[in-house]
Every structure is written in C-alpha cells, then in structure tokens.
Image (tube, coloured by chain):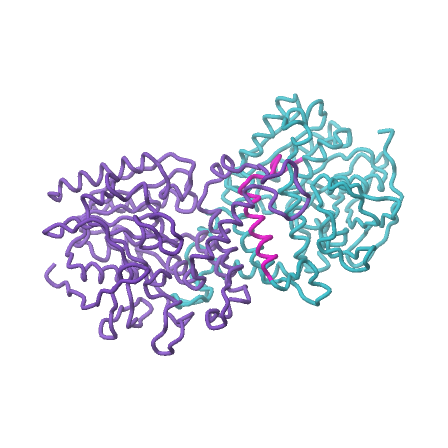
Chain colours: A cyan, B purple
Amino acid sequence: MADISISKGIDSANVLGSSIQFTEDEPLRLDAGVDLAPWVLAYQTYGELNHDKSNAILICHALTGDQFVASSNPITGKPGWWPEMVGPGKPIDTSKYFVICSNVVGGCMGTTGPASLNPKTAKPYGLELPIITIRDMVRAQAKLVDHLGIDQLFCVAGGSMGGMQVLQWAVSFPERVFSCIPIAAAAKHSSQNIAFHEVGRQAIMADPDWKAGRYFEAGLQPTKGLSVARMAAHITYMSDEALQRKFGRKLQERSAPTFSFDADFQIESYLRHQGSTFVERFDANSYLYVTRAMDYFDLADDFEGSLVRAFAGTTTRFCLVSFSSDWLFPPSNSRTIVHALNAAGASVSYVEIETDKGHDAFLLDVPELIVTTQGFLNAAAHARGL
Amino acid sequence: MADISISKGIDSANVLGSSIQFTEDEPLRLDAGVDLAPWVLAYQTYGELNHDKSNAILICHALTGDQFVASSNPITGKPGWWPEMVGPGKPIDTSKYFVICSNVVGGCMGTTGPASLNPKTAKPYGLELPIITIRDMVRAQAKLVDHLGIDQLFCVAGGSMGGMQVLQWAVSFPERVFSCIPIAAAAKHSSQNIAFHEVGRQAIMADPDWKAGRYFEAGLQPTKGLSVARMAAHITYMSDEALQRKFGRKLQERSAPTFSFDADFQIESYLRHQGSTFVERFDANSYLYVTRAMDYFDLADDFEGSLVRAFAGTTTRFCLVSFSSDWLFPPSNSRTIVHALNAAGASVSYVEIETDKGHDAFLLDVPELIVTTQGFLNAAAHARGL
C-alpha cells in the first residue's frame, strides 16, 4: 500500500452533494488513451469512517443509477435507490460501515460526463468527451478512495453495471479490496446485451432533437429517442413471468380494447410511463456513454482471455449472487466467474436465488439477497476484525 | 359445407402477383365493428388444384412476411421466404399440393392496408384504416378460399403470427380445416411480446417523418423509427446462444475497438443492416397495424377464456411445433395449446425441437422441422385419400 498517491483534488458541495474537483494537473488517464482534465467526481458518504479506516464499503451504481444510494435524490425527490440493502440495520449497515457511492464518469449527476462543460470550448462536451470504460470508472473511484485516505476498502458491492465495476476493482486493485459482492453481473457484455444497447443508442441518435449530441446548445433534448431507449431496456430488466404476473393482458382503465393505438394494455401504459419519467432525470448523451462502457467491458481482455489469470493470486473474498429469471445477466454469467475464481483458488461464495423478478431483483425486496449479503458481510467483518 | 357463399370478387394481376378486387357490395366485416369496402386481397398460388379440390394448403405468413412463399419477391428480388418447407419435394410439396398464400389485411404487399387509397378521401388510409385483427386476416383468407371454390383446406400452416392465423382458422372454420400446422405460435400474445411491439410502435411514432401516419402525402417515410423498431424486434427473433455463437463480441473489420459509437461489434453492424434493409421493403403504418393485430390476439376470448372450449368438437388434425430456444413464443405457449387440444379430445401431435436458433428457427434449415411436418402431412394425406 506504500505507493498510493493521495489525490490533491478539492472538495466542494452543491445541490448534487459532495464532489471533488481535480485540476489540470490531476488528470484521469482514460483507456481511450487520453487524459481527462480538469474533471469532477460527485459522491455521497453515509456513516462514519473508523479510526483505522478499515470499515469503508464502496457501492458502485448501475447504468442509470447515481450516488444517492441511501439518501433522497435531489432531482427526483425519491429516496435512495437501494433501500433494502443500505441503511441502519441493513446488510450494508450505515451504523457500522462507512459507505461511499460516487456517480460514474460519463454520468449526469455531477461527475464529469458529456453534459459537462468542455474547458477547451466552454460548451458541453457532447460527443467530444472520450469514450469511457468500466475501468475508467473504477480508476476514478480509486482517486476518490485515495482522497478519503483509505488504503483498503472493506467491501466493494454493486449490481448489474455496478457488479462489473466490482469485478474490475477486484482485478485492478486486488490489495485494496478485502471483500466484494458482484450481484447479477458478468465478466463481459454478451452479444445480445450489446444488441439491446445498440437499439437504445440508435433510438436516441434517430431523434432529430439529438443534433449529433449538441442538443443543449440548441435548447433541445432528444426525449422521444431516449424514452424509446428506456422502454426497450426496461423490458430486459423484468422477466417474462413477472410481466405476465404483474400485467398479463390486463387492460388499462377500460373494459374492452379500443381498437386503436392507445395504450389499451397496462404493460403499454407502464412502459410509456417508464420512458417519460426517465427523460426527466437522465441525459441522453450519458446514456450513450454509459451503455458503451458496458459494451466494451471484458474483464479477461488484459489476460489473454483468461479469467482465471485475471483473478490469479487474489486474496479478496468474493460473494456472487445471481437470479434465476434474470435473462439479461443470467446465472450462467455468474457461474463462469465462480468457476474462474475456484480455478484461481479464490475464496468465493455463490448464491443463485430462485425468483421471477428478473434482472431488477437486485434492487427489490428479495429476502434471500438480504440474508446472503448480511451473512457474508458479517463473516468478512469478523475476519477483518470489525 | 352447404352454406359457403362463393365470392364475386374480380381477379386481377400486377407486379405484386394475383389479387381479388372486392367491390363496395362485398365488404370485409372487421372485428372493429366496421365494414372494409372496397378492398383487395393479394395472393399467390403454386401447384395444381386437384379435381375434387381436396389438395389445397393455405400458408399464413408472419409479421413481415408476404404472399411470395415459394417464388421471387418482386420488391426485393429475393427467393420465396420458406424455401425449406415449400416447393417440389419439400414437406409442403408443390408437385402434390395446391399451395395458396395471401398477404394479410393491413399489410403492404398488395392487400388492402394503411398505404392503400381510402376511397372516401382518395388519399392513403394512414391511421384511418380500422384496426385489423388476426380474425379479420383469417376472414379475408376465407373469402379467397371461397373465391377459389375450395370447401375444405387440406392443411393450414404457418409460423409465428402465421401460426396464430392457423389456430384462428381451426377455431373459426373447424370444418374447413382438415389438418393444420401452427409452428412457434401462441394462443395469445404475452405481456412481454406486447411490450416489445409497443417499443417498436413508439419508435415509429417518435420519428417526426411519421407525421401522424400521413407521411406519404408529405413525400416522407419514417425510416429511422421503423429501422429502430426492426432492430429491437430482430433481437427477439434470435436466441442469446445463437447470437453468442454467430457474433459473440467479435469486432467488425477491425482488430481493436475504436473507442467511438461506430459499429465496432459485428452484432451492431448486423442489426443496423437489418434495420436499413427492412425499411426498403416494409411500410411503417403496416408495421403498426400488424403488430397491433398480434397484440389483440387471444384465441380463448370468445370462449370465456377457455381454450378447451375453443377447440371443442374439432375434427381437425393438429401438428404443433416449437423450438427450445425460442423465447418470443416459448415452448410453454405450444404446450398450453396441446393440453387444451388433448382435453378437447382432438387429434394432436407435438414436437419440441432442440435448437439454439430461437424463434426464427421456423424459417431456417432445421431438419427435425422438415421430418416432422413431412411425416404429419404424409399421414394426413393418406387419411384424406390423397
């Protein structure tokens, strides 16, 4: 741990919570081969860091998540996005652990992203922002952890794209991760998942209000395209069974079909609502960047395609969780990782939870998820002397 | 069979093949509660009708299919869409059977659809065309069968939406269907499937060139929206496994990612190609109408929700086929129908074919599909004295 360079970034706070301002001299080296500087990292913390700084848990958010994991989102006014998992008495217990959550690079909740001002042009970056990768996101988080003076995180946890970041943490900074919980994750993005992301991006880019990414200057936003992108993605977050159970072919506030293109079916009305509320809180260009980061993710890429080699020598304790009805990041993805961890001689627990809630299960009230993560963290805390 | 009224429609032929022109006096009664008249039904036939008119097979096409099942499509120049199944020596043997295939009502290949001229306005119907249902499509086909002087079809066959029509034929006109082959079908459209269709429709409607359906008059076409709709739908036609096998994370004509939004991955390039070629052959409003017909499909609706009652007393021979990796119309859908047919005491064969080709398997070279349908049709032909 001797060579950790503590960041010089300057703290500030605004409506989007705490942030660190990194100057021109403190660039973020990106996988795209360029330096991002100056740049900002927005984050929230919960609970207290203990004396020897050994009780920190970093939470990594998913595609459309943010740093407000356990407190009200200032844009939507909604409570934190992981209420079942984070808070006093919850598995990630804020009365016991120091919980950190930052907005990803490329996002739109305070961390530098395509809507941020490009200092070279004094206009929003738009597509002038270099492509961001999952590793870039993790590298940025490491700067935050440096800034907070923490050598080793007690745990890194997250679901979906958050789980990708967790895995990248374990591979990029193995000595800095005592334990980790990648939930509903994968070591690489599948062809089908890239396909769904590409549909979303094409929907955004097809919207004439997108203006090749320069919509802010035109006083516009590609809300229709972004809404379609969200609708398509939202289907993939739910299982066929759950949709059937929740909506089936039930009609929306009518007793007979209208023989029209109105939202006759509840599922149509629900999806339209998902689309129209999403555009109020998310930036279209960020959607392009963050989906692209997921597409590019392939953990074994630096290890000649060998996941086993990626995890070689790791002392991190792993707890993987997947959900039986998750068809976006199916259990087979987690099993592949578990097999590699076993082959690498790592300490690994794996639970495949039987549920019809699909990929979104990681965000929902799933008792087995609570029990699993609580048990794992308690044992890890004991081992860490917490 | 005594009460079949032979249609008075007038035959004609043009670039889109044969068609029947039904006059103002020969309306098509629609489920929406209105009469469509005048109207046109475009169709193709292959092979010879035998003396006692007992060797006719009607083929029903899927969402974006057409009447050119076994001959070159005049728009695309491509060969017939079901080469493995229809032709001399194929299971649906055109040297033995008289094969009929018509374009569905609401389509865009010669049969009356939203791009047809509304005689009341002398402009294309656009959204003034009433909503069409699967039953309407079948009712129109029955007029064609009447016109051809055929009392009973030897077989009705089709996959996907074609399979829905096959099932509707068996329920609406049980005495007119000696045997039938619904492939990769369902007795009702699922919530997830409605959801995917709604995404496609919203993508089209979000395109400013859609102009509330009146794009032809503006000299425009909502090609971007239609392309996104096709891309989203196309993902659902293939299995995750097949995508992984065919494309995986392979890059498109490059050795390293470009760190851009270019189509780096082969799957992206493939999908974009699917979108851009589709818009050259399909009308956006037809896409709205035909997807809506599928959404509204629920075979048991007229029978107080009982599929068993829908099939009560049927003497039709059924052969159902499903594909293990089809997640759009999964085998469970076919099994539900088979159970109902068994409970109704019907003659039914069912084969669930193990393949990774997904929903599109019905259009591809799947030997088990050939063997199954050939065996079934041979036995049925024997029973029918053919």
| Residue at the image point whose x is 34% and y is 56% from the top | B298
Answer whether residue B312 is visible to the viewer in this image.
yes
Q: Quadrant location of residue A180?
A: top right
In which image quadrant can residue B379 be found? top left
Q: Where is residue B183 in the image (x, y as percent from the top left)?
A: 32, 45
Q: Is residue B116 magenta?
A: no
Q: Tell me which corner region of the image, top left, top right, bottom left or bottom right, holds residue B8.
A: bottom left
Which residue shows up at 41% across the image and 57% down it? Answer: A249
Q: Is residue A279 above or below residue A179?
A: below
Whether residue A98 is visible to the viewer of this picture, yes or no, is: no
Q: Nearer the viewer, residue B119 or B248?
A: B119
Counting the numbered discs, the total is: 0
Residue found at the very far bottom of the displayed protein: B120
Left or right? Give the position of A167 relative to B274.
right
Question: Which image quarter holds the C terminus of chain A?
Answer: top right
Q: In this view, does A175 lie above or below A237?
A: above
Residue B193 screen position, x and y as percent: 44, 52
Which residue is at the front of the view, A330 or A28?
A28
Q: Answer whether residue A202 is magenta in the image.
A: yes
Where are the magenta residues, as a range?
Answer: A181-207
- Viewer-proximal residue among B94 and B76: B76
Q: In this view, does B290 lie to the left or right of A226?
A: left
> Left of A325 or right of it: where is B2?
left
The percent position of residue A29, horizontal first and vertical second, equals: 79, 41
Q: Where is residue A45 in the image (x, y as percent from the top left)?
A: 78, 47
- Image quarter where the N terminus of chain A lies is top right
